[in-house]
Image: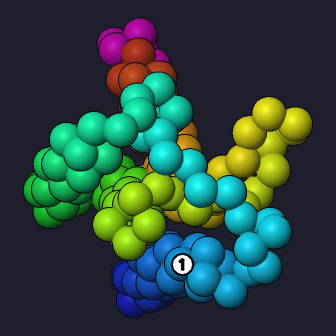
Amino acid sequence: MRKETTKIKIILFWGTLLVGVIDQLFKNFLPKSLIYKNSQAIFGYFDGSVAVKIIIPILIIVIICISVIKSRSFWIKLSLFAILVGGISNLIDRLLYNATIDYLPFFRFSKFNIADLLVYMGIGGIMVNCMLNNTARSIKYANR
C-alpha cells in the first residue's frame, strides 16, 4: 500500500511539472494570432516595474520552495508545487518577452494561460486543505 501511495505522489508531481512544460510549448508553438502579450503583473493590477515583474516573483518562488521543503502535508506540498511551476513558467515569459504570454480566452474581457491555472489550482488546493483540516479539528473538539 505504501509503495502505491509513493507512486501516486511521484506521478502527481511529475504531472504538474509536465503541465508547466506544456504551457511553455503552447506559448512557443501556437499561432501568433491566438497569443496575447500581457505586460501587467499580479492579476493585472501592476504595470511596468521590474521589481513587481521580476524581483517579487523571484522572492515568492524562493519562499514557496522553502515551504514545499518544510511542509509535512502532501496536498499542501502539491498545491505549493503547482503554484511554483506556474510562477516559474510566467517568470520565464517575463524574462524572455517582458510580458506573460496568454492564450486561453476568459469571457470577452480577459485571457490567461495554463501557468495561471496552475497558480489558481494551487491556491484552491491550499484553501480546501485548510478548510478540511479546520473542519476535522472542529469535529474532533466537538466530540470531546
Q: Which residue is mark 1?
A: 24
Classify mark 1: residues with Cα within 10 Å, few (<14), some (14-19) or many (20+). Answer: some
Image: 140 above or below 69 = above
Q: Residue at x 60, y 83 (%)?
A: 28
Q: Residue at x 68, y 86 (%)?
A: 29
**Nearest the eye: 76 or 36:** 36
Q: Tell me if residue 133 is in the magenta stretch.
A: no
Say which quarter of the image contains residue 82: bottom left
Q: Is residue 12 visible?
A: no
- Image quarter of the C terminus: top left
Q: Residue at x 58, y 62 (%)?
A: 101
Dominant secondary-structure state across the stretch colored magenta:
helix
Q: Amino acid at mark 1?
A: Gln
Q: Position of residue 120 (x, y in %)?
A: 55, 45
**Nearest the eye: 51 or 26:** 51
The colour scheme applied to this rendered structure is rainbow
Q: Position of residue 94 (x, y in %)?
A: 38, 60
Q: Tell me if residue 143 is in the magenta stretch.
A: yes
Which residue range is magenta in the image? 139-144
Residue 119 is left or right of residue 22, and the answer is left
**Nearest the eye: 113 or 65:** 113
